[in-house]
Amino acid sequence: MEGLTLKGFIARKLVEEARRHGLSPEGYVLEMLTQNLNPRERAREYAEAAWELLEEAGEELGRGNLRQAAEKTWSAAALAVKAYAYWREGKRLASHGELWSYKSVMASELGEWVRDAWGSAVHMHVCFYEGWCDKGDVGRAVKEVRRLVEEVRKKVYSRGL
């Protein structure tokens, strides 16, 4: 099955539960599906989901759907940070504040460019709600977040820290 469309009660319930937990619908489903995996396996699942969301962001950008591209870019960055935390120390990040803090851990280990990628992703989260960004803003953010996701994927598939 390539795609899944949910409507009606199930879709509303999924969105409601995701919001209650401070997650995107995709993040909430991923959390539920990976809860019985060990941290390294969970990190890989999160990294793959981040990659797929980023690919979808590029497709949405190509169609001119800037808000959806922006939100998928934000979600990809958030999942990449979560993947890194699972990979590095088996830690579950459960809030925006924890994501903000952990990106600093990543920046100290991967490089200061992580802060720029994270900042671009956060701007995309705002863009989703406000619609202020243009195609160039989203394209730049996709590029920066792509580097973040690629680096995290390399780490979670490596043997050690």
Image: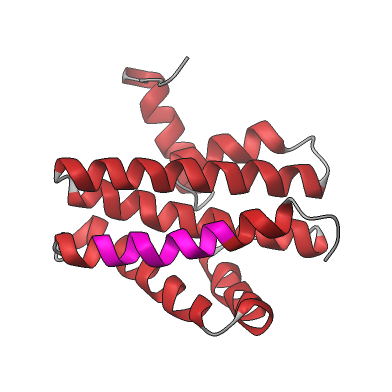
Nearer-the-camera pick, 23 or 144? 144
Left or right: where does residue 18 sit relative to residue 95? left
- Name above or below for residue 47 compared with residue 144: above
The mark tally for this picture is 0
The spot of residue 73 in percent (x, y) is: 37, 55
Residue 94 visible in this rendered orientation of the protein: no
* Residue 11 quadrant: top left
Give yes or no for residue 156 being in the magenta stretch: no
Left or right: where does residue 108 sit relative to residue 41? left
- Name above or below for residue 30 compared with residue 86: above
Q: Which residues are magenta?
A: 139-150
Left or right: where does residue 62 sit relative to residue 116? left
Residue 67 visible in this rendered orientation of the protein: yes
Q: Residue at x 47, y 40 (%)?
A: 52
The spot of residue 18 in percent (x, y) is: 48, 42
Q: Main secondary structure of the magenta part?
A: helix
Q: Residue at x 31, y 69 (%)?
A: 123
Q: Residue furthest top?
A: 1
Q: How is the image coloured?
A: secondary structure
Nearer-the-camera pick, 61 or 10? 61
Q: Residue at x 22, y 67 (%)?
A: 137
The spot of residue 154 in percent (x, y) is: 67, 57
In the rendered image, the quadrant that contains the C terminus is bottom right
* Residue 80 quadrant: bottom right
- Name above or below for residue 121 compared with residue 27: below
